[in-house]
Image (spheres, rainbow, N blue to C red):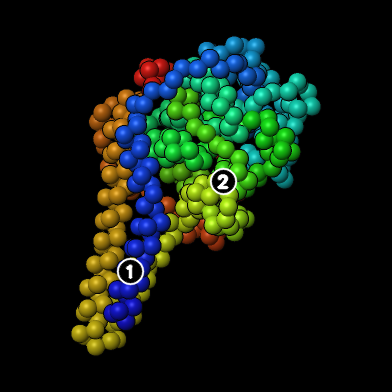
Amino acid sequence: MIEAVTNLNRIVIIVMTLAYLYQILYLVVGLIYKNKKEEETNAPFHRFAVLISARNEESVIGELVESLKKQKYPRNMFDIFVLADNCTDNTALCAKRAGAIVYERWNAQLVGKGYALDYLIKEIKNDYEKYDGYIVFDADNVVDPNFIYEMNKTFEKGYDAITSYRNSKNFGTNWISAAYSIWFLREARFLNFPRMLLNTNCHISGTGFCISDRIVEENGGWPYHLLTEDIEFSVHCAIKGARIGYCDKAMVYDEQPVTFDQSWNQRMRWSKGFYQVNANYMTSLVKGSLGKSKLKFSCYDMIMTTAPGMLLTLFIIAFNAVMIFACVTQPYYIANVVMKRAGKFIVDTIVAFYIALLVYGVITVFSEWDMIQATAKKKLLYVVMFPVFMATYIPISVAALVKKVEWKPIQHFASENFTPSAAAAGKD
């Protein structure tokens, strides 16, 4: 029993360390090349359709459309489309008044952003001339004035899709919104930015991304309907060899949940969606990472992104806890050793979990300090709570395994006195 506990713990530590070690390289690259300047290019202006799927978003849809109308990009080169999806409020009317082209959809069976985007894209293709690409936003977003201009420069390089720098409107509201914000800032700075520099695939993340008409035509629309359709799309691109880039200067501001109930429901959907992606694509990802695919490493990166790390952490803690209870009936000299080793491992795992996430949070906040719209006090206070927020993923991951999860709306509110950060204008 003593050897079983020791050996399993040792194996788990070695395997998980080796599996995620490459992300240390991402961290180093993100720190070293943070201020690397790109050469200015005179990219031709491409035509874009801006897509917004909105369900009962009358309070925020006008704010997003207004921020899009202020883009420093030729106004005749992009159109703003809003899909009022199963709305029971005045979302459609508010979007029209703000200046968007509005469609409405009523379908109580096919519910979710994936179905809504597919419907909107097909309607646009039937009614309008061809666009070069489609830029997707959530209704609660506010967009930096240079977003489309910067995205267009990266689009000209031939990527099938491009993701952007995802900032937050409400970092300073409370520890929940701040934790979300830190997670997405980390994703931009220390995942997608290094991936772009290392010439491996980036991952789109819910909002603020662009897809080329070429890949839409190849896929026959937007056939991604799992609960996390953004991850499904990213996985599909890695498997098929489609390239996803990242535009560091294209910034979108997202509104994060502020109550734990909202956060729980949203992350339940995300966790369930990750399980769905694993069930549908894991075999193909493993084959891609071991085969001759030109995006072999991207397939491996997606495996580690979708892997249920929280469940693995919980499993090893639970295993050690079981060993502690199981050894109660054993002779004292055996029980004493097992309890000490298993107990120490549980404590060490929890402490290491907190410290690792705290370090990542601190590095992210200080690295992106000028991009975060909050007081210094709140930045420092909420970064300490970041590991606590992440720890709540453990029960969520367990619940998502056994519970039926459906999409649930999150109420959004118009931003009072919010303007894109002045620091964004000089972002390198």
**What residue is rendered at 56% in x and 17% in y?**
43
Task: Identify the mark at residue 294; answer none if there is no mark.
Answer: 2
Marks 1/2: CA distance? 35 Å
- 72 relative position to 317: left or right: right
Q: Residue at x 57, y 43 (%)?
A: 234
Depth order, front residue of 351/111: 351
Q: Position of residue 100 (x, y in %)?
A: 65, 18
Q: Which residue is mark 1?
A: 9
Above or below: residue 151 compared with residue 76? below
Residue at (55% x, 37% y) in the render: 244
In this view of the protein, which residue sits in the foreground, 150 or 82? 150
Q: Which residue reaches farthest bottom?
A: 331
Please tell me whether mark 1 sits on a helix, a strand or a loop.
Answer: helix
- What residue type is disc 1 on? Asn
Front-lying residue, 77 or 284: 284
Say which element carries label 2. loop
* Left or right: residue 113 compared with residue 361: right
Q: Percent from the top left, x then y, of residue 163?
A: 52, 33
**Amino acid of disc 2:** Lys
Indicate which disc, 1 or 2, sits on the residue closer to the N terminus. 1
23 on left or right of 102 = left
Q: Position of residue 231 (x, y in %)?
A: 55, 44
